[in-house]
Amino acid sequence: MRYQKTTQVPNEVFDLHLTELTFSELKILLYIIRQTYGWKLKNGKRKQRDRITHNIFKQKTGLSRRVISDVVQSLITKHLITVTDYQGNKLHTPEQRKGKVGIYYAPCFVTCAENNKKVCKQKHKPVQNKVYNKTNTTKLNEQKSFQQKIKISDWERMQQILETRT
């Protein structure tokens, strides 16, 4: 099933980083993923980075400017995002980012969303062959034999159990 108006979030976010991220970090990270992996370019590839201002972060996440700056620095330290200028020079510290007009944010995940690559190269193999499938032989035979047994009352069944115990 293909979802047209959705954004592919890398499983790594949920599997590895969800427990160690704060609420603010998660908000900023998900917004950066939305602005990059959530858009396709004309050539069909996903965006690698996007220019996002503090005002846009403030508007979309509801966080203050100071919190945004601290969270961006925290995500850079955790190697979850990269921040660059127009030429692609990395801006690791707040001092390097201060006063820059065009700051570009990019998530640091190697995903299938990056280049629309198919991760799985082998065809799906069935888990069980029909010859050894339990439902074809064992369960069906047990069901048939169970249906062929004569139904007895509870009292008769209790008598049988008591006889086997003695």
Image (tube, rainbow, N blue to C red):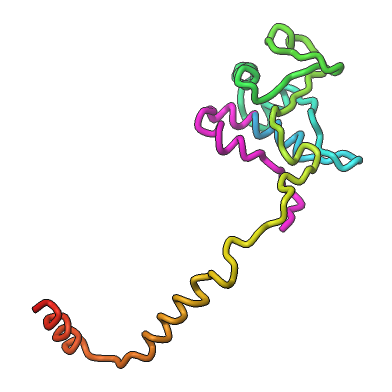
Question: Which image quarter holds the N terminus?
Answer: bottom right
110 left or right of 42 in image: left
Q: How many marks?
A: 0
Q: Quadrant of residue 115?
A: top right
Q: Position of residue 13 (x, y in %)?
A: 60, 35
Q: Position of residue 28 (x, y in %)?
A: 64, 29
Residue 159 lies, in percent from the top left, at 14, 86
Question: For the point 54% across and 69% down, which residue is it?
Answer: 132
Please state if 47 lies on the left or on the right of 165 as rendered: right
The quadrant holding residue 56 is top right
- Quarter of the image with the C terminus in it: bottom left
Q: Farthest front residue?
A: 131
Q: Nearer the viewer, residue 89 or 23?
A: 89
User: Residue farthest to the top?
Assistant: 95
Is residue 11 covered in magenta? yes
Tell me which residue sits at (69%, 31%) in the image: 109
Does the stretch in magenta take in 51? no
Q: Find the magenta span and give its range.
A: 1-28
The foreground one among 21 and 58 is 21
Q: Nearer the viewer, residue 18 or 116?
A: 116
Residue 163 against residue 100 in the figure, above or below: below
Residue positioned most to the right: 42
Q: Where 48 sits versus 117, above or below?
A: above
- The residue at 74%/8% (across/down) is 96
Q: Residue at x 63, y 16 (%)?
A: 73
Rendered location of residue 62, percent (x, y)? 62, 30
